[in-house]
Amino acid sequence: MAAEEESKMSEVLPREILKPFNKMPVRNAATVLLVGSYGTGKKQLAKSMVDVCTDTGLKLQVRTTTSLPLPEENTDTRPRIDYIAFIIDLTNRLSFSTVQSAVQCVDVEYFLGKACFVVTNVKGTSDHCVEMEEVSRLADMYNTMYICGGIKEGDPDERTTLANRLLQLVEVSAGRKKVSPLLVDLTCRQLSFQEEQTEFYTV
Amino acid sequence: MEVESSKPSSTVFEPGLCKPVPTSATSTISNKSVYSETTPTPSQEKQSVEEEGDVTELVELKGTKEWVRRQLVEHEATLLARQQDGADNSTQEEVNTNILHLQSQLHEQSTKLSVQELVLERLQCGDALSKFLFDSPDLGGTEEEPSDKEKEKISEMVKKQNELVFELGKYHKDIQDLQENLDRVKKESFEQQVRNRELMTQVQQRKEGQQQRSQDDSSDRVKMFESHLEQAMSKISSLQHIFQALMIGSQVHWAEDPDMEQLMISLGTPPDI
């Protein structure tokens, strides 16, 4: 088992792992990376985020990718990635497996409040190929929060709400708010009560 | 301001300064003092516009300073974390308790800091306000009339602020009560669920016991009934044979009568249920 894990880890080279502190931060600017397979609605979400952001005075750059690691050609021109959002579509099995392989190419420091999972198509369980339990297990494994929202289906208001939420998290991780990302990460989970709950579920 | 570029391949790098602020701000800082309010100028409008411009730039610079400080704190924390060796011998539980402890400490310190900052801001605002309202102005008497209007405005705002703070206090108290209620209800529901689970397991056990007992009983009863049935069958077949023997022994020509023939044949077939 250990040998298998080592061989898996050696497939990702150290220089390919995305690290948060490799580049300089930029004042009044932030970069978000949306990771998700085709058809998850990254471009629409990116557009909503940019539309929401025009009033706040923050220069937001949204980059999208279908897989990690990122190509080496743009490494020099690419700015520092302040926040990563992994998009999982519950009706698309490929999106979940893409995210599962992508999280291995991200440095652990991103999972201290600079990353989250965005889960879409949560309503209407008849079309689901991915169980919500799998998503919550993945989120627990990486100690990162997940947000449920709608990008393609439903009202455009849902997309705007999701964009707003992501934008608040991005602003925190870019250092524009007085709160540090670790504090936000800490307060989104009530650890003491959660432990009681897990005991209850195993009875 | 200098900008240092980070080394591309290193895992640990020296935190540099941020990008330079817009050159207009740097030029005003270098050319004239920001505190230009005390120097009297001939045109007051020009002065107020310049003051506003200075104030916005000052606010922007303050924001930049805060941002740089926060970035520095983050980078220093990351450096510290990377320098610490991960204790591989500790179990998962120990790591979890450590994390919980550290998180509660972070929570405590952040709340302390934000409360201190709020108190400081309040004190500064109060000080400035009281100076504005109650201290006599240093300049001549011609400015008294507009300052009275401004004073009225400000006293109105202070009254409004007092009312809002009072309302806020009330809402806080309501929220606190509701939160306590919620916690109590959550706890109760959790206890109820645990009790329900226990009762369900008891019910399950009793049901299983009952089923077991009924199976045993039924198997005994079934055996009894089966034995009774066998006895009855054997009695019937022996009676059949006796009747057959009687008919043959009575020397009746049973083959000539179709009814008698039928009876004889039926007596010969074994009983079938």
Image: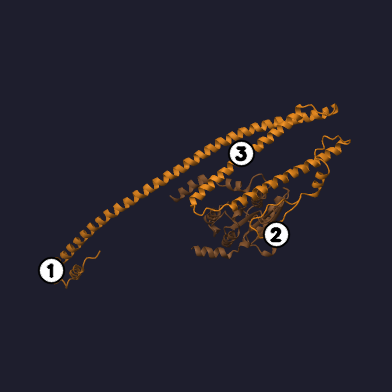
Chain colours: A brown, B orange
Q: How far across and how far down the image is residue A21, in percent?
A: 65, 55
Residue B53 percent location from the top left of the image: 81, 42
Seen in the picture, residue A88 relative to B180 is either above or below; the reply is below
Give how far apart the Cα atoms at labels 1 and 3 are: 113 Å
Q: Residue at x 47, y 42 (%)?
A: B189
Q: CA distance from mark 1 to mark 2?
A: 112 Å
Q: Chain of mark 3?
A: B
The chain letter for the residue carrying disc 2 is A
The numbered dot on residue B245 is: 1
The image quarter in which residue B253 lies: bottom left
Q: Amino acid at mark 2?
A: Arg
Earlier sequence position, callout 1 versus callout 3:
3
Would you name the residue on which mark 3 appears? B112
Residue B33: give x, y in percent of width and height.
Answer: 81, 40
Q: Which residue is mark 2?
A: A78
Chain holding disc 1: B
Q: Is residue A169 visible?
A: no
User: What is the x, y in percent for residue B84?
Assistant: 57, 52
Can residue B242 be seen by looking at this rendering?
yes
Query: Label 3 sits on what residue type?
Result: Lys
Helix, strand or loop under label 2: loop
On the rendered structure, is B33 left or right of A104?
Answer: right
